[in-house]
Image (cartoon, rainbow, N blue to C red):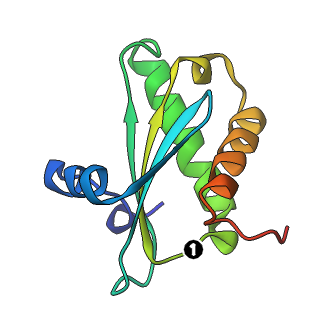
Amino acid sequence: MRKEFRIKKNKEFQLVFKKGQSFANRQFVIYKLAKKEQSHFRIGLSVSKKIGNAVMRNQVKRYIRQAFLELEGQLEHTFDYVIIARKPVSDMEFEELKKSLEHILKIAKVLSRKN
C-alpha cells in the first residue's frame, strides 16, 4: 500500500475519532469518516502493545494492509478509515483476519456485496 494512502498524523487520527462513525466486533474497532474531495481511501492503523511484541504488532499491521489491498475494488473510496486491533487478533491467521475485517466493513456499510 502506497504511503499517500495511509493516515500518519495524530491530528488526522483525532479528526476521524471525533467526527467519524465507529463500528466494532470482537477483533476490530473501525472508525470511518467521509471525505468527498478524496479519490482514494486512506487507512490508519493502531495496534496496542497488549497484542504482543513488535514483531507480532508489525505482522498484524501487514496483514491488515494486505487485506485492504485485496478488498480495494469493493471498498468505498471516499473515506478515511482508522482500524484498531483488539487482543484476539494476535492468535489469528491471515484468512481469519481478512474474514473478520470483511465482516466489520459490511456492518459499516462500506463494502459492496460483490466478490
Q: Quadrant of residue 114?
A: bottom right
- Which residue sits furthest right? 115
Location of residue 37 with respect to 25 vertically, above or below = below
**Tag 1: Cα neighbours inside 10 Å, few (<14), some, or many (≥20)?**
some
Reading the image, the residue beneath label 1 is 76
Picture quadrant where residue 32 is located:
bottom left
Left or right of 46? Residue 64 is: right
95 or 77: nearer the viewer: 77
- In the rendered image, the vertical position of residue 31 relative to residue 115, given as above or below: above
Q: Which residue sits furthest left?
A: 11
Residue found at x 45% / y 25%: 57
How many marks do you count on the picture? 1
Q: Between residue 27 and residue 39, name the one nearer to us.
A: 27
- The residue located at (60%, 24%) in the rendering is 89
Task: Say what secondary structure mark 1 lies in.
Answer: loop
Q: Is residue 65 above or below residue 27?
A: below
Residue at screen point 60% across, 29% down:
27
Residue 3 sits in quarter: bottom left
Q: Give the amino acid type for the residue marked by disc 1 in the picture.
A: Glu
Image quadrant occupied by the C terminus: bottom right
